[in-house]
Image (cartoon, grey):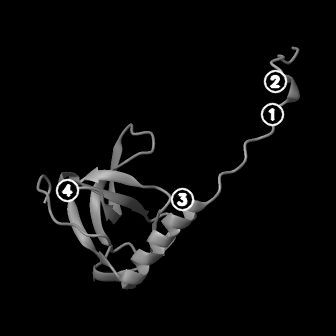
Amino acid sequence: MEGSIEHFVRGDVISVPFPFSNASATKKRPALIVAESDSNNIIVCPITSKPGRDYEIKLEDQDFRVGQLNLSPCYIRPNIIATVEKSNVIRYIGNLKDEKINEVINKIIEILQKPSEPPPPTSKALERGNRPKS
């Protein structure tokens, strides 16, 4: 499948070289397609076997309509999103049931609508342009 553009849909689980957050490298890992961005790109969330991360959504074999990961349980990370070229897909793993897809999409919406944390208070001296004395 590598090197060819296949037809993928929201809810497909695939294996891709997923970029690290600092874009220094990639790691081959399963990912959930949450949207198709254009004819050549897909928007994905990574899937990990390590629990205990912010916003994680548990993924088990019974959540699949087709296929499975053989690492049950795993965890979808909806707070990490990347755009990947379809030609970089290594393999198709399966497709999730609508309930699980909707859970992930709703969590992404919740994250995007979460109000920003207020910035920490600044020192009055810094606001006036004064430098703190050493």
Give the Cα distance between marks 1 and 2.
7 Å
99 up-or-down from 41: above or below: below
Give the Cα distance between marks 3 and 2.
32 Å
Asked whether the residues under the numbered discs 1 and 2 touch, taking CB atoms below 8 Å apart as contact, a structural biologist would say yes
Q: Residue at x 84, y 17 (%)?
A: 130
| Label located before the other in sequence (3 or 1) | 3
For disc 2, the marked residue is 126
Q: Quadrant of the C terminus?
A: top right
Q: Is residue 77 left or right of residue 43?
A: right
Badge 3 amino acid: Leu
Q: Count neighbours of disc 1 (C-alpha within 10 A) and say few if under 14, some if 14 to 19, many if 20 or more.
A: few
Q: Is residue 120 left or right of residue 83?
A: right
| Label located before the other in sequence (4 or 1) | 4
Badge 1 amino acid: Thr
Asked whether the residues under the numbered discs 2 and 4 touch, taking CB atoms below 8 Å apart as contact, a structural biologist would say no
Q: Residue at x 39, y 39 (%)?
A: 23
| Label located before the other in sequence (3 or 2) | 3
| Label located before the other in sequence (2 or 4) | 4
Element under disc 4: loop
For disc 4, the marked residue is 39
Element under disc 3: helix
84 up-or-down from 1: above or below: above
31 and 74: which one is in front?
31
Badge 2 amino acid: Leu
For disc 1, the marked residue is 122
